Amino acid sequence: MTTPAPEHEQRPVHLAGRSILLVLAGGTAGTAAREALSLAIPAVGGIPVAIFAINIVGALFLGALLEGLSRRGPDVGRRRSLRLLLGTGFAGGFTTYSALAVDTGLLLADDHAAAGIGYALATVAVGALATVAGIALAAARRRKQAAR
């Protein structure tokens, strides 16, 4: 039987093949979901509402996921795998702040400065609130489970 390498000799988690595959699988699914939604939901008045909603839902999801996982203990084993698959992978592929930047730039370039600035600020502000809401929801769920 082979003895595992000491912790200081193990490959960093971000370079481990299993970690890379988990992020790849989650990222592929998240990107596909984002693309499907962005194609299905048209812009309203030049504002890409699909991308706005995707970023808000993703922020809520990520806040809830990371809070839920952190309350369950150290980031090892199954928790680490879930974080990599769903957090780094799925949420990372699903949300798109690069599209936010491009869409904002396009609105500004098309002389829709107020819409562009409003879209960018609203996405960041509402996204931050959604993250806090996700954290609060996960914490409340955990308290409710602990009370049982």
Image (cartoon, rainbow, N blue to C red):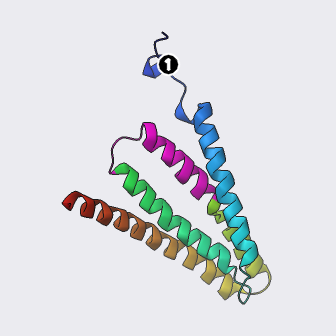
The question of residue 73 being in magenta is answered with yes
Instruction: Name the spot of residue 144 as percent of width and height, x first.
Output: 25, 64
Q: Give the image location of residue 137, x and y in percent.
A: 36, 67
Q: Residue at x 57, y 75 (%)?
A: 123
Q: Relative to 7, does residue 104 appear above or below in the rendering?
A: below
Q: Residue furthest left?
A: 147
Q: Which residue is at the far front?
A: 148
Q: Quadrant of residue 31?
A: bottom right
- The residue depicted at 58 percent of the width and 37 percent of the height is 19
Question: Total label count?
Answer: 1
Depth order, front residue of 133/113: 133
Give SS at disc 1: helix
Residue occupying the point 59% across, 31% down? 16
Up/down of 139 relative to 49, above or below: above
Q: Residues within 10 Å of mark 1 (few under 14, many from 20)?
A: few
Stretch of the chain drawn in magenta: 71-93
The quadrant in which the C terminus is found is bottom left
Q: Give the answer, above or below, for where 25 lies relative to 68.
A: above
The picture quadrant where one finds residue 143 is: bottom left
Q: Magenta span: helix, strand or loop, mainly?
A: helix
**Amino acid on which the number 1 mark rests in the picture:** Glu
In the image, is residue 16 above or below residue 8?
below
Residue 117 point in image, percent of width and height: 63, 81
- The answer to whether one can see residue 105 in this image is no
Residue at x-position 77% and y-position 77%: 106
Q: Is residue 143 left or right of residue 101?
A: left
Across and down, in percent, residue 40 comes to 73, 76
Asked whether residue 33 appears in the rendered view, the answer is: yes
Question: Mark 1 — residue?
Answer: 9
Left or right: 14, with 33 as reference point: left
Return the residue found at the far top. 1
